[in-house]
Amino acid sequence: MAHFPGFDLGSYPGDTAIAAWALAGVYKWCGYYLSAPCHSDQAFVPWTGRASLLHSLGLGLAITYVGFQQQGCGSTELSNAMGILHGMDAVEKCLNEHFPGNAIIFLDVEFYSGAASTAFIDYYRGWLSAVLESQIFQPGTYVAKANFDEIYLAAQEEYAAHGLTGSGPAIWIALEDTSFDPANASPNDCGIAQANLWQGLLDTEQSQGGTQLIVDLDTADSDDPSRTKSSLSVVTIDYTFIEEDE
């Protein structure tokens, strides 16, 4: 399998730093965080509006949306309706960024202990449903390897409900491995056959182009994991499928 090293970090590091890393030529793509309920502009330096610059520097993107979680942020507000609203929010933000149709948005599902609650699965499926129903973008999921099986099963059930039996979202696996080498590892080396991306090292201090950053290191099966490098036609969204919870 072809593999392309990438990196991600929550806050935008600045134009000078990102240019230094891009022009060093080691990494082919980076994470691109949308402003989201659990990744706010107050807590992180936003990436908003930087996609064109990143593309001009030769970087592909992995669009990431951090919604409510099983544990921690938003865990007391989980519902299918909330997942739908957040999926709509992710779609609207990608439209505002002028990302092309068929681009993949990765919902960040942080590691949780034990089994996922019914409320979280409902939220997750609602988010997937909204992105699928947009008929513009495609869903992806960032998930710890330990949580993959039940999350992917829930995704397959939601896809089947949309007439897409046997299908599922693009998968970004989080599994820390001290021997991980993003230049040589393939995503499915993490042990998940469905993996399109693998995040193998967390909070790693590294210097590229004379600029030091603390990043997570990844590998992907594409140099543009979210398929962002093309123009976007003007589109409208019909969300009449949505039924609010009674």
Image: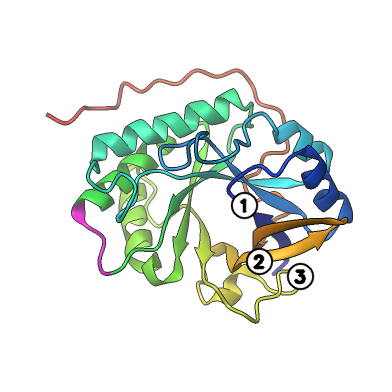
**Quick check: 66 left or right of 151?**
right
Amino acid of disc 2: Thr
Along the line of sight, the residue nearer the viewer: 38 or 29: 38
Q: Position of residue 103 (x, y in %)?
A: 59, 39
- Residue where numbered disc 3 is placed: 183
Classified by dominant secondary structure, the portion drawn in magenta counts as: loop
Label 2 crowd bin: few (<14), some (14–19), many (20+), radius 10 Å: few
Mark earlier in primary sequence (2, 3) = 3
Amino acid of disc 1: Leu
Mark earlier in primary sequence (1, 3) = 1
Q: Relative to residue 58, is residue 202 depicted above or below?
A: below
Q: Which residues are magenta?
A: 114-118
Q: Can you tell which quarter of the image residue 205 is in? A: bottom right
**Quick check: 184 left or right of 200?**
right
Magenta-colored stretch includes residue 23: no
> Of circles 1 and 3, which is in front?
1
